[in-house]
Amino acid sequence: MRSGQALTETSESGSPVRVQSRAPDRHDGSMGFTAVLPSTMEAVEGAARDFRRLFGVLSRDVAGHADPDPVFSGELLLREALLNAVLHGNGSEAQQNVYCAARVKRGNLLIVVIDQGQGFDWQAAMARDAAAHECTGRGLRIFRMYATRVRFSARGNRVALLKRASGDWKREQE
């Protein structure tokens, strides 16, 4: 995917997937992508693959070495947010869309995911800690573990995840 290239692909289910990417900016080193996805597991996997491809370049080129941690944790956060939007927000209804954006600037990753569902009581969900054996609630635990900051819209159908870079990775980018 080249910088600024807008792609409209068709998933196996026939739903359009639109992705816009942006290569690193020379001035501030920021880069990112936005996507409109159908509510399917296939679309989640495709977005995770695109994230890994785009931001894997960042960890090598901008940082000067291959550090898989920012890419792994960023992909994990994106995947969990998208899965929550598809499964819980949109009820896996492929005709409903999930909007996502991911951007890295000065070593900080911001991910925003919005679904078309009714939302949920995120305050109650964040207050409880799901046990490892539970089938739901672990995504929020992952948000707390890997994101520096987690913010939901009042309705609960939009999440913004901030992951601040740490250690050598951030220092080398500044």
Image (cartoon, helix red, strand yellow):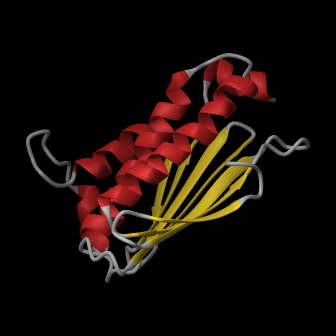
Q: In this view, does 25 lie above or below 119?
A: above
Number of numbered labels in the structure image: 0
Q: Is residue 67 above or below residue 70?
A: above
Tell me where residue 174 appears, x and y as whole percent. Answer: 81, 29
Q: Can residue 164 be seen in this view?
A: no
In this orientation, which residue lies closer to the viewer: 77 or 58?
A: 58
Q: Is residue 17 above or below residue 145?
A: below
**Residue at figure coordinates x 32%, y 75% from the top left:** 94
**Residue at figure coordinates x 20%, y 48% from the top left:** 129
Figure quadrant of residue 33: bottom right
Tell me where residue 147 appears, x and y as whole percent. Answer: 47, 43
Query: Relative to residue 129, is residue 144 drawn left or right?
Result: right
In this orientation, which residue lies closer to the viewer: 171 or 62?
A: 62
**Residue at figure coordinates x 53%, y 38% from the top left:** 52
Query: Relative to residue 70, is residue 107 drawn left or right?
Result: right
Q: Is residue 151 visible?
A: yes
Figure quadrant of residue 126: bottom left
Taking the view exactly as shown, the residue that stands out farthest to the right is 27
Tell me where residue 142 appears, x and y as whole percent. Answer: 33, 43
Query: Relative to residue 123, is residue 35 drawn left or right?
Result: right
